[in-house]
Structure formats: structure tokens, C-alpha cells
Amino acid sequence: MEKIYGISLSDDILFGKCVYFEQNTLSNYFALAKDVEEEINKLKEAATITKNQLRKIYEDNVNTIGKANAMIFKSYETILADEELFKKIEETVKELKCNAEYAIFKAAEYFSNMLKNVQNEYIQARKEIGLLLVENMHREESNHKLSALLAESRNSLFKNQGLIIASSSVFVSDVLAFPKLGVKGFITQNGCETSHSSILAQSLGLVALVGTGCNLEWLINKELIISGPEAAAFVEPEKETVKFYLKRQKEYNTQKQQQKSVAEGKNLTKDNVEIKLMANINSVKDIKEANENGAQGVGLFRSEYMFMNRVLPPTEDEQFEIYKQLLLSNKGKPVVIRTLDIGFDKIPSYYKNMFSETPSAFGDRGIRFCLKHIDIFTEQLRALLRASVYGSLRIMLPMVSFFLDEVAATKELIDKIKQEFIKDNILFGKDVKLGVMIETPAAVMIAPELAGYVDFFSVGTNDLLQLTFAMNRNSEDMRKEIANNSAIIRMIKLVINAASKKNIPVSVCGACAGDIDFLGSLVGLGVSSLSVAPRQIFGIKNKLREITFTDELRKISNKLNAFLEG
């Protein structure tokens, strides 16, 4: 029995047999051109067919996989409309006097070399567009290669078996076809959990192991177990191993049912004090897990992740579609979207020239960056307000430190956009809440003023701890020291006192919110909601049931000193 490790896209366990799928490579198509103009016409015809194909894929699947996931195919249409790409292909055909297929490969290679510092996802998308173009040039010769492969062997090989694809990599179009072809999961040599194909696989409920780093051709016809929790695959497992994982699969299904039961209940302490539990998410795909675990909404959507791993920033319309999907998916539950928080360790390549100093935890971050680059900020606020008609939107400003310079300027900008929308008959929500992250010591100290100017607070403990203790937020020493630290307790209490006087809610959304050892203190402090990673909700919900609010309140009172009185 062999064992293969990789990156798991699911917590489920899958049993089945493998079909090896050799992904096409563009370099295999070289031939000299008999007629250069004929090759260029062939390219143009294939581009038209591919454009219509992508549009149909989007329309046929948008309701199944959700608009945010289906937008992948819209982005492919954008690449297909890239004049520079087609100009390079045509130049290559003329220069090398080669066929269009090979010219596509050379053009893709050229742009890949130009974009060495760009994340692979964009290069992968160009490669897939190239393969779609080539497939459509040869559409009369063969059907989809994977479909034909499965049709040949299905009857003899997969009777009463799960079907698992092994390949060097899979493209978005492959993943979309898997459920229709009876494929339950896949294992790949390349790939990562944030790629378009991986995100799509998760939304379709496929079990997959990606980025194994192994040549997988030897897996053909092999029996396989993919264990999501262990991020591993077992090849030709022994009887005892099969028996063990069948038991694990049954336990997993039972646990999911129990988790569903707990998720549907209220988040109550032992003495029936309710604490709202929200989810911190980076993308629309995280909502499914959050809802399954009983999240009462999204307490933090980190909008900056929409801007990462791209060649160009998302347009207003692209942002609008994602915000809309977030709101629709939460079905009326509140969604807190943090405005763009880049700087330090999160700087998109196309914005790097806007940062004059060496990136650090200080300087141009969050709201400071946005107000310096008002066109970027305006575009995001426009998209947010347009989407606000689809749910309960709350806009949150990060890294606030200067009251009037930041919050007041943002409110003025929002009011200006609303007036423009009214003039242009553009709809927007009438009850959009505006809040701030309390994540700098300065924000803690001006909390009384801020409380009279915004609708909610959210304490971002990660940066607050880093700036307060002058320690790196990822250091082991800081993690050991923060639990129940009296300085942090005092700061959070100051914020809660300021908020209670203006009757606005306070949430905690940093790592402290998911720290079981700190949970009692947060309850005793009077925090109204916690926002944590989706996977943490279930455990915190269970722990809350062991906590008595009155006991925690008494403990906190004993810890606080005269510094907080008055």
C-alpha cells in the first residue's frame, strides 16, 4: 500500500478507482503552415466559437455553482478579448510560418515569461483559453477527451465503484464536467487550494487532493481512498485500511448530522445569555461552511483578497457581483464587509508603486491608503452601495486612528455617491450600517467620540495586540502572553463602555475571538458577538454552553482595577 500526501479540498472520505487523464499540452501541435492567412482565419473562427462556448457555460451553470463562481468564465471571456494576446499569436504565425495551434503555445509561453512575478492562476487561465481554442479548431475530429476516455471503460471498470480522476492538473472546464460524468473526486500533481478549479471543486462538493508533487500516471486502474482530514490518498489499500476508513466515513457523516443539530440551536451560555457567532471569510466559497456550522452572518469579509493574485484590480462591476452574491447567500443575515485593507504583507503587484516606503505594519494601510487613493475607494464604495439592495450590508473601515480625518471623510464620500445614485436612478439600500475596526491604540482612546459617529464597533485583536505590545502578531511569545492579559481586558472594556453609552454593539473579530481560553473573559466583558473562522464556530458554540455569564462577569470585575472606574 502506497500513501500520497497533498492539499485536501474536503473533510470527506472517498473510495473509488482511478482513471488517469493526460492533460493536453499546447506544445504538441507544431506544424508548418501551408497558408498563413488560412491559419489566422482558423484562429479567428475558433475565437468566436470559444467566446460563445464560454457564454453558454456561464448561463448553463450560474444557478448551480453561484454567480461568484460562474464569474470565472466571464473573466475567461475578458482574456479571450485581449487584443495583445491575439496580436502576438498572429505575429508568431507570420514569423515562424507555423500553424495557429503552435503559435498559441508560443504566445502563452511569451506572456508567461513576462508575468513571472504574477500568481500562476492567471497564467493557468491563459493556458486553458489556449487549449479551448485548439480543441475548437479540431472539434469535428473528437469529442471532449475525458468524456471519450470514460465512455470506453465505464462498463467494465467502474461498476458499483466511485470514479476518481488522476491527472497532472485539472482545468475549470474539466471540474465543471466531472459531476455530469459521474466523477466523485480527483487527485493532481499540481494545484493549490485557492486556484479557480479548486474553488469550483469545493462548491460542487467534490473530494480532491491537489498539489501532491507526484507523477500520477501509475495510478491508472488502482483502487484509492482519499482521506480529506489527513490530506492523504491510500493506493491499493489493504482490507484493514478499507475497514478503518469505512468506519471513519460513517463517523464523519454522523458528526456532520450532530453538527447540523447544534448549528441550528441558539448560542447560549449556561445561564441563557446569548452571544452572536459570526464568520470571518475571505471568499464566497467560505459561506457554505459558515452556514453549516450555524453562523448568524458574516462578521468580517476581507475584501482585499479579491484584489490579490490578479494582474489588474477588480472592476466596480466585478466587485458588485461578489458583494451581491455574499448578501444573497446569507439570506438576510448581516454581512460586514471590511473596505480594502492593503499594505504591509498584502500589496497587489499592480499597486506596489503606490507604496514609497518599505512595507511594514505601519504607514499606508487600510483607510489611510483608501483616502489617499480616492478613485480606488470610490469604486469600492459604489459597488458596495449598489449591492446593498440584496441584503443586510454593514461597511467597516480598517485601521482607523484619526476620527474626523477618516470616518467623517468616508461618510461624506458615501453621501456624495448616494446623491449621484439618486440623480442617475441607481438603487441602493436605505439602511446600510457604517462601523469601524478598533485595532489601533489610538482608536481605543477615541472610542467615545467614534461611538457617536458610527453604527458598530469590531475589535480587531490581531493588529491591536501587535501595536500594543510592539511584537510581531505571528510570534509565539505574543500568542502565549495575550490570553487574559490585563492590558487587553482593559482596552476591550474601555471600548465596550464607550459603545454602551451610545447603544451600539461591539464584536471581536481577531484571533482572541476564537481562543477558547479567552472566551470566558470576552463573555464577562459584555461582548455582544464574536466573529471567527467558520471551522471554529462549532467548538465555540459548545464551549459557550459550559460558561456561566454571571461567574465570568464576577471574575472580570475582580481583574479590573480603579483604572476603569468612572
Image (spheres, helix red, strand yellow):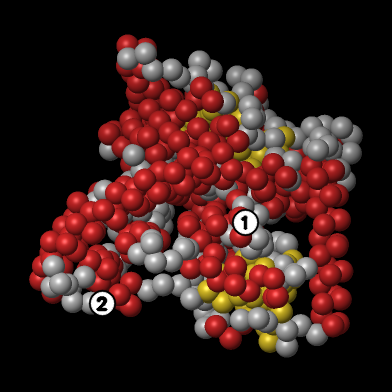
Q: CA distance from mark 1 to mark 2?
A: 33 Å
- Pick the front one: 118 or 90: 90
Q: Which residue is mark 1?
A: 179
Quadrant position of residue 130: bottom left
Secondary structure under badge 1? helix
Does residue 291 appear to the left or right of 67 in the view shown? right
291 lies above or below 14:
above
Query: Most extreme residue toward the top, as rendered?
Result: 423
Q: Residue at x 37, y 13 (%)?
A: 425
Looking at the picture, which amino acid does disc 2 mark?
Answer: Phe
Q: Residue at x 53, y 44 (%)?
A: 61
Secondary structure under badge 2? loop
Q: Residue at x 84, y 70 (%)?
A: 246
Quarter of the figure with the N terminus: bottom right
x, y percent for residue 371: 32, 34
x, y percent for residue 110: 22, 69
Query: Most extreme residue toward the front, as rendered?
Result: 140
Tag 2 or tag 1, which sits nearer the N-term?
A: 2
Does residue 459 appear to the left or right of 420 in the view shown? right
- Pick the front one: 452 or 245: 245
Q: Residue at x 39, y 17 (%)?
A: 426
Q: Which residue is mark 2?
A: 30
